[in-house]
Image (cartoon, rainbow, N blue to C red):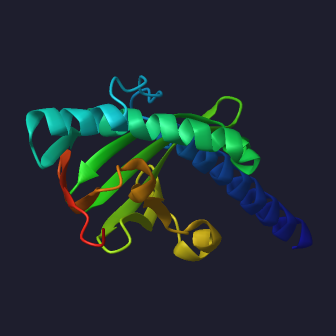
């Protein structure tokens, strides 16, 4: 009787072990990016040249496409990765952003270990504050490919990202409104009222 219990226990242990291996292999292949995600090219226009173009066209609005947004964001994130050594463990291989209605879908291609590539999504809510001239990007959810990551695991990582645009604008100009639409952003400029 004891021999029979041992053989059943051994079968259960081997079955669980094989199930864990199969699940690990399936997860490995599932989290791979569907397509290669690299870094975008350096943008052709800098912010001062965009503002110059606005004044030359005598327009109060400018539209930034998804491709331009990806170029600016790639440059910013690559500089940020050099400044934050704790992020090097994730070995970010590339990034792509989709502009959604009042939200950004940031797709990161990570290689935390050799031969393991993962597609990681961060969804950021877009908020614009006219008084402080601050663009606030707040993480709303994160997924590993399509698998949701519990919020309690990443609570310390979910700090909003704030961009103060006053440093980039001439003294008399302010941003009146930012409309985050699918595929593009429209930025409306105006004169500062406090000056």
Q: What residue is at 43 percent from the left and 45 percent from the top?
A: 107
Q: Is residue 56 left or right of residue 89?
A: left
Q: Is residue 164 left or right of residue 24?
A: left
Position of the N terminus, as image quadrant, is bottom right
Residue 170's place in the image compared with 131, above or below, is: above
**Position in image of residue 133 (x %, y %):** 35, 65
Residue 72's place in the image compared with 9, above or below, is: above
Residue 16's place in the image compared with 106, above or below, is: below
Q: What residue is at 71 percent from the left and 30 percent from the top?
A: 114
Query: Along the line of sight, which residue is nearer the eye, 24 or 129?
Result: 129
Q: What residue is at 64 percent from the left and 71 percent from the top?
A: 156
Quadrant of residue 65 in the image?
A: top left
Q: What residue is at 40 percent from the left and 54 percent from the top?
A: 146
**Position in image of residue 71 (x %, y %):** 38, 32
How many discs appear? 0
Q: Residue furthest right?
A: 2
Q: Residue furthest front?
A: 195
**Position in image of residue 122 (x %, y %):** 44, 56
Query: Along the line of sight, which residue is nearer the eye, 151 or 39?
Result: 39
Quadrant of residue 127 in the image?
A: bottom left
Query: Along the line of sight, which residue is nearer the eye, 49 or 66?
Result: 49
Q: Is residue 172 left or right of residue 60?
A: right
Q: Is residue 118 visible?
A: no
Q: Is residue 102 visible?
A: yes
**Position in image of residue 82 (x %, y %):** 68, 38
Position of the C terminus, as image quadrant, is bottom left
């Amino acid at each position: 009787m004891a021999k029979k219990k041992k053989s059943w226990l051994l079968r259960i242990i081997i079955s669980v072990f094989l199930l864990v291996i199969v699940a690990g292999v399936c997860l490995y292949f599932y989290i791979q990016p569907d397509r290669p995600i690299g870094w975008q090219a350096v943008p052709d226009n800098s912010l001062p040249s965009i503002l110059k173009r606005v004044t030359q066209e005598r327009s109060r609005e400018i539209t930034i496409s998804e491709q331009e947004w990806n170029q600016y964001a790639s440059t910013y994130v690559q500089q940020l990765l050099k400044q934050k050594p704790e992020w090097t463990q994730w070995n970010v291989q590339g990034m792509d952003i989709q502009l959604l209605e009042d939200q950004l879908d940031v797709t990161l291609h990570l290689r935390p270990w050799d031969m393991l590539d993962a597609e990681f999504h961060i969804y950021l809510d877009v908020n614009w504050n006219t008084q402080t001239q601050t663009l606030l990007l707040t993480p709303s959810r994160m997924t590993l490919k399509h698998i949701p990551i519990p919020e309690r695991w990443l609570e310390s990582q979910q700090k909003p990202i704030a961009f103060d645009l006053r440093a980039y604008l001439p003294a008399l100009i302010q941003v009146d409104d930012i409309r985050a639409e699918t595929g593009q952003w429209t930025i409306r400029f105006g004169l500062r009222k406090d000056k």
